[in-house]
Amino acid sequence: MSLSDKISNKADEIGGKAKEATGAVTGDDELRAEGKADQAESAVKGAVEDIKDAVGNAADKVKRAFR
């Protein structure tokens, strides 16, 4: 995962936490839910990027093994 992807995902996560907290304080259930959804989306993006990295690393190992 590139550094910019990590930064973007972390920003989404933090923004989601802020929305959730604001929703909790103001009693806005919709904003709270939106914050939780933003955090979940960030987690999924991070997991997908981790899988891409793992697959790429495995492919590199296989290529090296056949050289």
Image (tube, grey):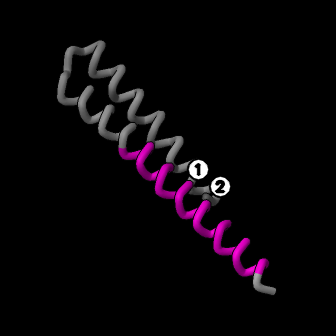
- Binning the other alpha carbons within 10 Å of mark 1 as few (below 14), some (14 to 19) or many (20 upward) gives some
Residue sticking out furthest to the front: 66
Q: Is residue 45 above or below residue 14?
A: below
- Residue type at mark 2: give it: Leu
Q: Is residue 47 above or below residue 56?
A: above
| Residue at image point 36% right, 40% down | 40
| Residue at image point 76% right, 84% down | 66
Q: Pointers 2 and 1 in contact (CB under 8 A)?
A: yes
| Left or right of residue 31, residue 22 in this image | right
- In the rendered structure, find residue 41 and report the number of the disc placed on it: none
Please name the residue that numbered disc 2 is placed on: 3
- Residue 38 part of the magenta-drawn span: no
Residue sticking out furthest to the bottom: 67
- Frontmost residue, 62 versus 3: 62
Q: Position of residue 18 (x, y in %)?
A: 40, 27
Q: Is residue 51 above or below residue 33?
A: below
- Residue 49 part of the magenta-drawn span: yes
The N terminus lies in quadrant: bottom right
- Frontmost residue, 26 versus 55: 55
Q: Position of residue 16 (x, y in %)?
A: 38, 34
- In the rendered structure, find residue 6 and report the number of the disc placed on it: 1
- Binning the other alpha carbons within 10 Å of mark 2 as few (below 14), some (14 to 19) or many (20 upward) gives few
Q: Position of residue 30 (x, y in %)?
A: 18, 29
Q: Secondary structure at mark 2?
A: helix
Residue sticking out furthest to the right: 67
The C terminus lies in quadrant: bottom right
| Residue at image point 60% right, 62% down | 53
- Residue type at mark 1: give it: Lys
| Left or right of residue 21, residue 23 in this image | left
Q: Which residues are magenta?
A: 41-65
Spatial CA distance of label 2 from label 1 is 5 Å
